[in-house]
Image (cartoon, grey):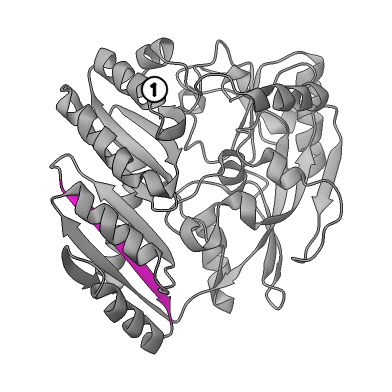
């Protein structure tokens, strides 16, 4: 690492409470790879940081010797608007990217609760929101990627057009790896046009069975939702959010059709009110004493809502739940540490949900609860891949799933 890209760590560089003595800020892809090579040679416990929005996620690190920041790798490399693709460096924020793409009426259809979330961090955590319903997660949108390996190499996979299938699918491999395998240098995504108009149908219920029936009816209909979410608040009310994004005529026709299928008290939101409603869906990630992510089969939604109600009735735990009807969501929990640990254990003991991950919580809670849950059979395969890509085991300071 050259002296001009290395500085002492400060309080703002803490990783879940741990202060790194050094921070590297490489200004080129090769400098990024060189920093990881030197860290590997010195067996320095290393965390790769983008916007720093998720530094409290994962296991508490025993120590962090080095943070490698992508803040200086923040360029939009190429926007091929005719092909609906873009190549962007890892340190650029999602917000900045979509502002740049909007000039051609295109966008990268990913939602994040974090304004400063970077492209590299979003891919590394496979961070997604309501737009996942139509467009999938970051893993589904990546068509090419450049990685910096701990041996100092830069490797590329995929290409710049949607039909390109060159190379190994490294994009899917590192999506959701939480920085444990390699450093993300740049990513090529497929894009979608910005819709002409949108509106959101919101229906409110006081009965879990009723919202589950309406969700099933809407899901089985011909309505083409851009986003389809549910919410369960601490006040024991249930809300359904159905966003239609298309031409004005088609939007109005589909909203009218959706109204006939819901039994809850329904309203239609547009413009500022609509944007605020979807922003509130993302904010579940930001507050409370703990955030838990989990998944379920769509047909098991009634059982999931019943389980969340059981957690409330058990006492001492407040629960706010937001999720996609396709079977993925997060719960914001509030309460004492002992009660929170018991709630996570209850979720993991359920046959109706899976992949229960404690994204965020206090140090005390993380000491009581395994953040990533019990080991799975597939973890052995991923661990073998990590041993090849990061043989010194320096990446992410033990915070990630592997």
Could you say which is closer to the camera, residue 35 or residue 344? 344
Coordinates of residue 236 in the picture (x, y in percent): 15, 43
User: Which residue is the extreme one toward the bottom?
Assistant: 249
Residue behind mark 1: 349
Q: Position of residue 252 (x, y in %)?
A: 32, 83
Left or right: residue 204 versus residue 362 is left
Neighbour class for label 1 at 10 Å: few (<14), some, many (≥20)?
few
Can residue 88 be seen from the camera position used here? yes
Q: Is residue 398 left or right of residue 54?
A: right
Q: Quadrant of the N terminus?
A: top right
Would residue 186 be found to the left or right of residue 201 on screen?
right
Residue 82 image point, x, y percent:
71, 78
Q: Is residue 67 left or right of residue 96?
A: right
Residue 349 among magenta residues: no
The magenta span reads 237-246
> Is residue 310 positioned above or below 299 on the image?
above
Residue 46 in the image, given as x and y percentages of width and height = 66, 22
| Residue depicted at 80% across the width and 32% down the height | 149
């Amino acid at each position: 690492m050259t002296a001009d890209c290395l500085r002492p760590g400060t309080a703002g560089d803490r990783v879940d409470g741990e202060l790194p003595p050094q921070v590297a800020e490489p200004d080129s892809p090769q400098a990024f790879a060189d920093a990881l090579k030197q860290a590997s040679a010195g067996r320095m416990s290393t965390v790769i940081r983008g916007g720093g929005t998720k530094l409290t996620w994962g296991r508490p690190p025993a120590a962090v010797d080095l943070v490698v920041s992508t803040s200086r790798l923040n360029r939009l490399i190429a926007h091929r608007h005719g092909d609906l693709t873009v190549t962007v460096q890892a340190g650029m924020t999602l917000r900045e990217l979509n502002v740049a793409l909007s000039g051609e009426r295109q966008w990268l259809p990913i939602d994040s609760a974090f304004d400063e979330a970077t492209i590299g961090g979003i891919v590394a955590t496979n961070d997604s929101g309501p737009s996942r319903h139509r467009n999938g997660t970051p893993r589904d949108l990546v068509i090419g990627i450049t990685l910096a390996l701990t041996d100092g190499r830069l490797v590329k996979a995929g290409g710049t057009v949607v039909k390109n299938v060159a190379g190994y699918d490294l994009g899917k491999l590192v999506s959701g790896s939480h920085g444990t395998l390699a450093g993300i240098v740049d990513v090529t995504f497929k894009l979608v046009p910005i819709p002409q108009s949108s509106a959101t149908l919101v229906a409110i219920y006081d009965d879990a069975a009723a919202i589950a029936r309406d969700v099933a009816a809407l899901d089985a209909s011909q309505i083409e939702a851009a986003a389809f979410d549910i919410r369960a608040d601490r006040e024991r009310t249930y809300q359904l959010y159905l966003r239609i994004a298309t031409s004005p005529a088609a939007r109005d026709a589909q909203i009218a059709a959706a109204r006939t299928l819901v039994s809850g008290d329904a309203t239609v939101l547009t413009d500022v009110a609509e944007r605020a409603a979807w922003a509130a869906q993302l904010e579940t990630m930001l507050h409370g004493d703990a955030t838990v992510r989990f998944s379920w089969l769509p047909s098991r939604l009634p059982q999931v809502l019943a389980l969340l109600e059981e957690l409330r009735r058990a006492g001492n735990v407040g629960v706010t739940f937001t999720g996609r009807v396709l079977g993925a969501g997060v719960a914001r929990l509030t309460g004492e540490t002992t009660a929170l640990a018991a709630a996570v254990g209850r979720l993991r003991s359920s046959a109706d949900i899976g992949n229960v991950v404690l994204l965020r919580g206090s140090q005390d809670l993380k000491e009581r609860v395994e953040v990533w849950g019990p080991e799975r059979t597939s973890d052995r395969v991923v661990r073998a891949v990590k041993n090849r890509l990061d043989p010194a085991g320096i990446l992410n300071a033990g915070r990630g799933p592997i």
